[in-house]
Image (cartoon, helix red, strand yellow):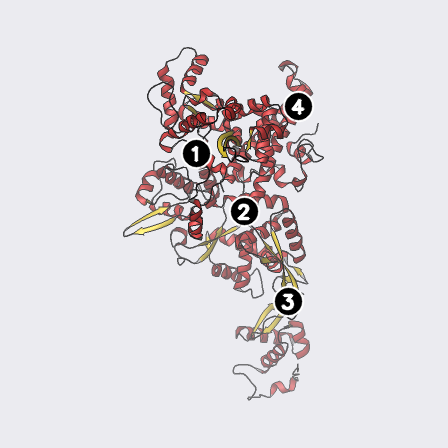
């Protein structure tokens, strides 16, 4: 489930880009989970036509995924197939990052139009290019399309409406086998299964077939399409309005957010390490990540493969500022990065965590908030509890942090009230019963709490931007010549305010993206 | 507690059975007096009053006893100007020392801060330091005149780690750690990013919402809202 402010923020973004109605539909799905068309209509109290149009837009913009499930019929009726819709929270938030994504793509490959258009077939891309750039060589467009594909900036769209078979009988024995196997085979939620079913096979995801003709979808979805069509034409007629019949025939392509986010995260990771440790550590990390390439599967690799010192060295000296480094200095950096060493005979190889969590990013963010909001003594108290990772008693906290006991209690209480700490009361048994308070940081709930606050802050920034624009609209609408004296001052001030707010939002968004990864 | 009063006449008579080798009568008398004070210690003027010995005799004797390692000088937290002496076998009582970090029932923040500063300066010079190294430096430096224990220094260093002024690391034996055994705990100055700074780490903390104590009451259209927020107004430097 998405956090409360996460939902508000997503709804606000949809509203800014696609209007109030789409925002209402989207918010409904985020709050209430996966719903059928009928349920959405009932919940939003919008007209059927409006809901259908909104769903079309949201699906096209990759914010909603449809899928078909089988529902048991009531009282002897045959089972029905219903279409359900789920909101894709992460993709909605990516809308905010569109400018950053475009920048990455244009840095590597020059300008591109796919980003703004949700999903397009190759034919439409070519047509659109012709419209915007005048007559153009199809081959030039194909070339740049292929480059985007090879860089994995774009991917095949998921199937518009995969069919989810009811969970199979043989899932039950897996659970009986015991705790260990149950851990490996965790039952997926319906939404997870839907996404997995919709996703094109890895081998097809970045594959374009050579001819220009409209192509079939991958096997799974085309089976389900014909299968579904043969079965229940009446029930599905309504949902066919949502899912454009044409989309099913052509291969559609869309932005591959995963790749863009991966690149942004890598950049941010290296930059963070440069600030936290030093430039050399940043260079070594960058070399290692380059050598490791991208993870093959959709699963995020937690650690790189083991790399030899020679390989690392060869890569490091290619980097800017890396030429002067030698084995010794690389070893020092590797140690600072907390890498794992594997010694085999004369050789040593190294592996490194690829998550920012390896570099205590989570802690750094939360601690900086605690420092700003509650003060230095609270900062020490929080860090002590965070490092301890277990319950500590009040006196012990006060002694270890050099905070007076009465102040320590106040601080602990404030942190607890704001959900940054857990607290328990312990009664000591024995001759004299006394009540102790013990305190602890719980990383999971803390992460949820802080992430929600970050969404809240992002929403606030956007609202404030809109507010300032509105307040200053008279000045902003004046022609340049009239901006003199007081008005000119006001205009400049508005510009400055806008820059502060927008750059803060960009930085915060990047922090959210990294923090979310934890 | 018995106080031995030594009359000037007895000083001329040697008492071989009670006399420590190498001590003259005056020193012996003063030593007994100091010992009798146990862990409270005694300061110079009191010694002079009680022994009724001449100033220069007392001074000379005290010097001699110090040199022989029979007495030590301790700081009386109640009055640091009084040079207080104690027999080496005693530790200053809490009244004298102030009981570790508390002074008159309050945390001695000045002392703690002073120690932190000395530790920090030393570490900045050394790049990497062990607990023993810092302890020796503190003792050598004389910033505290009482006998500070290694454990107390450890508590100071841990507090500095919590403040993120220094970081705790394990020696690798390489580079800056070459003189320190591998695996030994040591400390170094935290460096540029002591506390989360810069856009990436501080992105949330540096905007008003990150520091706001009222964030849980804030809504888009409530009494407390981003549009009406005074912290924002101040941060943006707007006053029109």
Nearest the eye: B172 or A50: A50
Q: Chain of mark 1?
A: A
Dot 4 or dot 1: first in sequence order is 1
Residue under label 2: A444
**In the figure, A261 relative to B68: above or below?**
above
Q: Are marks 1 and 2 on the same chain?
A: yes
Dot 2: element:
helix
Residue under label 1: A197
**In the figure, A515 relative to A474: above or below?**
below
Dot 4: element:
helix
Q: Residues within 10 Å of mark 2 (few under 14, many from 20)?
A: few
Taking the image as shown, residue B44 lies to the left or right of residue A351, namely right
Q: Are marks 1 and 3 on the same chain?
A: no
Q: Residue at x 65, y 40 (%)?
A: B215
Q: Residues within 10 Å of mark 3 (few under 14, many from 20)?
A: many
Badge number at residue B76 = 3
User: Which residue appears farthest toward the front when viewing the image?
Assistant: A76
């Amino acid at each position: 489930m998405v956090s409360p402010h996460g939902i508000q923020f997503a709804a606000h973004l949809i509203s800014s880009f696609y209007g109030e109605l789409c925002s209402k539909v989207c918010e409904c799905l985020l709050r209430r989970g996966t719903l059928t068309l009928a349920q959405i209509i009932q919940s939003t109290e919008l007209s059927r036509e409006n809901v259908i149009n909104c769903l079309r837009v949201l699906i096209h913009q990759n914010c909603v995924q449809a899928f078909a499930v089988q529902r048991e019929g009531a009282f002897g009726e045959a089972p029905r197939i219903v279409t359900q819709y789920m909101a894709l929270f992460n993709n909605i938030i990516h809308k905010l990052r569109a400018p950053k994504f475009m920048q990455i793509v244009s840095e590597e490959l020059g300008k591109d139009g796919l980003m703004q258009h949700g999903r397009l077939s190759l034919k439409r891309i070519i047509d659109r290019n012709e419209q915007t750039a005048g007559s153009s060589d199809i081959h030039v467009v194909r070339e740049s399309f292929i480059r985007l594909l090879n860089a994995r900036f774009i991917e095949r769209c998921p199937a518009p409406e995969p069919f989810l078979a009811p969970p199979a009988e043989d899932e039950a024995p897996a659970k009986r086998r015991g705790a260990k196997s149950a851990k490996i085979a965790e039952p997926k939620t319906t939404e997870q299964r839907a996404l997995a079913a919709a996703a094109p096979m890895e081998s097809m995801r970045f594959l374009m077939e050579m001819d220009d003709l409209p192509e079939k979808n991958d096997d799974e979805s085309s089976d389900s399409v014909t299968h579904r069509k043969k079965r229940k034409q009446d029930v599905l007629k309504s949902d066919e309005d949502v899912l454009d019949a044409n989309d099913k025939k052509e291969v559609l392509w869309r932005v591959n957010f995963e790749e863009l986010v991966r690149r942004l995260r890598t950049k941010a990771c290296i930059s963070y390490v440069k600030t936290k440790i030093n430039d050399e550590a940043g260079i070594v990390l960058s070399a290692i990540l380059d050598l490791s390439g991208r993870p093959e599967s959709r699963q995020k690799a937690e650690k790189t493969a083991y790399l030899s010192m020679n390989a690392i060295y060869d890569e490091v000296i290619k980097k800017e500022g890396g030429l002067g480094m030698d084995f010794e200095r690389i070893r020092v950096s590797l140690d600072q990065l907390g890498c794992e060493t594997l010694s085999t005979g004369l050789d040593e190889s190294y592996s490194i965590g690829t998550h920012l969590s390896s570099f205590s990013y989570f802690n750094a963010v939360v601690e900086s908030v605690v420092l700003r909001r509650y003060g230095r003594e609270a900062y020490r108290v929080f860090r002590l509890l965070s490092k301890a990772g277990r319950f500590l008693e009040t006196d012990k906290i006060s002694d270890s942090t050099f905070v007076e006991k009465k102040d320590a209690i106040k601080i602990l209480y404030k942190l607890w009230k704001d959900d940054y700490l857990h607290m328990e009361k312990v009664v000591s048994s024995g001759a004299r019963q006394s009540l102790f308070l013990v305190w602890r940081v719980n990383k999971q709930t803390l992460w949820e709490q802080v992430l929600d606050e970050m969404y809240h802050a992002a929403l606030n920034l956007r609202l404030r931007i809109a507010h300032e624009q509105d307040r200053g609209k008279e000045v902003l609408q004046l022609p340049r010549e009239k901006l003199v004296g007081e008005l000119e001052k006001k205009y400049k001030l508005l510009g400055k305010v806008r820059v502060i707010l927008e750059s803060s939002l960009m930085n915060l968004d990047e922090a959210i993206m990294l923090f979310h990864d934890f | 507690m018995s106080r031995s009063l030594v009359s000037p006449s007895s000083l001329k008579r040697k008492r071989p059975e009670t006399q420590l080798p190498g001590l003259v009568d005056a020193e012996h008398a003063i030593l007994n007096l100091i010992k009798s004070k146990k862990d409270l210690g005694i300061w110079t003027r009191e010694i002079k009053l009680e022994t009724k010995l001449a100033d220069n005799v007392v001074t000379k004797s005290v010097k001699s006893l110090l040199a022989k390692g029979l007495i030590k000088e301790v700081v009386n937290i109640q009055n640091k100007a009084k040079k207080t002496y104690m027999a080496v076998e005693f530790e200053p009582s809490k009244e004298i020392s102030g009981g570790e970090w508390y002074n008159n029932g309050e945390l001695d923040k000045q002392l703690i801060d002073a120690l932190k500063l000395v530790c920090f300066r030393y570490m900045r010079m050394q790049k990497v330091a062990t607990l023993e190294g810092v302890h020796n430096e503190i003792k050598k430096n004389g910033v505290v005149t009482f006998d500070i224990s290694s454990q107390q220094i450890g508590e100071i260093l841990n507090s500095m780690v919590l403040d993120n002024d220094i970081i705790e690391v394990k020696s690798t034996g390489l580079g800056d750690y070459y003189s320190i055994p591998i695996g030994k705990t040591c400390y170094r100055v935290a460096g540029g990013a002591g506390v989360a700074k810069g856009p990436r780490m501080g992105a949330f903390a540096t905007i008003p919402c990150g520091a706001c104590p009222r964030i849980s009451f804030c809504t888009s259209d409530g009494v407390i809202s981003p549009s009406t927020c005074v912290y924002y107004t101040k941060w943006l430097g707007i006053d029109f």
